[in-house]
Image (cartoon, grey):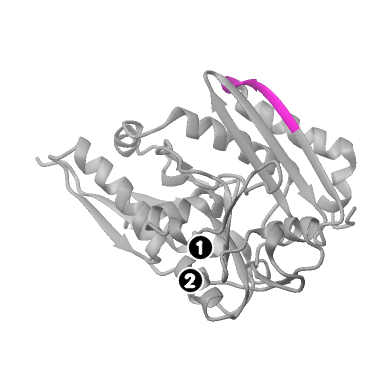
Amino acid sequence: MSPRTIRIATRGSPLAIAQTESVHSALVALHPDRSFEIRVISTQGDRMKDRPLPEIGGKGLFTADLEEALRTGDVDMAIHSVKDLPVDLPSGLRLGPLPDRVDPRDVLISREGKALDGLPRGSRIGTSSPRRRAQVLRWRRDLDVVPLRGNIETRIRKVREGKCDATILAYAGLIRLGLESEIAEVLEPDRFLPPAGQGAIGVEIREGDEEVLEILSEIGDASAWNEVEAETACLRALGGGCRTPIGASARADEGALTLVAGVWSVDGDVEFRAEVQGPVARATLLGERAADALREQGAEKILTGGEG
């Protein structure tokens, strides 16, 4: 009997397809005797593009349709950007080993190629992310942050057309699409923290599917797993979702892990930051420690809606 065909679900955006093809190519290279099939599934988040994400239901709008196909057995894997996944997955599903992570930093795209500090007063920065909005306003109170949704190419096009003067995107997405030439500035974490999990591809599978888990283990990257585990453990402990400005950036190096996390008021006036270090084997605990440190500083008011 020939091995079963492994069906891989993905959203239809160019970035989602690029991420899925990278996983598909790696699996085919390791298992040339197996059949792998990519299935494109339209999600509610892709169909509802006219309103900011926090207003219409958050991250789950990009994952629910793929997860339903996974639960019913129509597919065997679902490919996501880890930053789009809720910190707690639905019952019966789990995250498989993570492939190698791409640069997690944010970048600025501007119409005239100017860096954040070089933008004229009153420039319009397009983003629907509360985290990005808060950090832009923290550094440049004189800028105007306006809502902007759409895939990477759409947001770049809107900047070119003058719908806004600049936007902020994930460096990893531009790398995967070969659009690095569009970048005006890479925003360093000491100034601008990315979201938990950015740059990592999440492969969601069914609990108990040992065959698929074993196949995925061959492309898993331990550093990516430990970094993402620390970041998401912090987010989980803070109880934050897409409506709360929260950032987290972990780096694993030779068995040690450093995590920096931040919480902001929506207007950027108030910022709390914490940095923790320890062995990679304690990634979850480090994430929880960072969350505790942020709460001790006073972030609780923001997390519970009282602002800072």
Residue at the image point whose x is 31% and y is 39% from the top: 212
Mark number for residue 198?
A: none
Q: Is residue 297 magenta?
A: no
Which region shows up in magenta? 275-281
Q: Nearer the viewer, residue 227 or 292?
A: 227
Q: Quadrant of residue 299?
A: top right
Please rate how many residues cluster around mark 2, counting C-alpha atoms within 10 Å: few if below 14, some from 14 to 19, many from 20.
some
Question: Where in the figure is residue 53, as x and y percent of width and height?
Answer: 62, 68
Q: Are marks 1 and 2 in contact (CB under 8 Å)?
A: yes
Please rate how many residues cluster around mark 1, counting C-alpha atoms within 10 Å: few if below 14, some from 14 to 19, many from 20.
many
Q: Secondary structure at mark 2?
A: helix
The amino acid type of the residue labelled 2 equals Asp
Q: Nearer the viewer, residue 73 or 88?
A: 88
Q: Is residue 280 magenta?
A: yes
Ranked by sequence position, the earlier of labels 1 and 2 is 2
The amino acid type of the residue labelled 1 equals Phe
Residue at the image point whose x is 79% and y is 40% from the top: 273
Per the image, the residue denoted by label 2 is 46
Vertical side of 257 occupied by 83: above or below: below
Asked if one can make out residue 44 in the rendered structure from this viewpoint, the answer is no
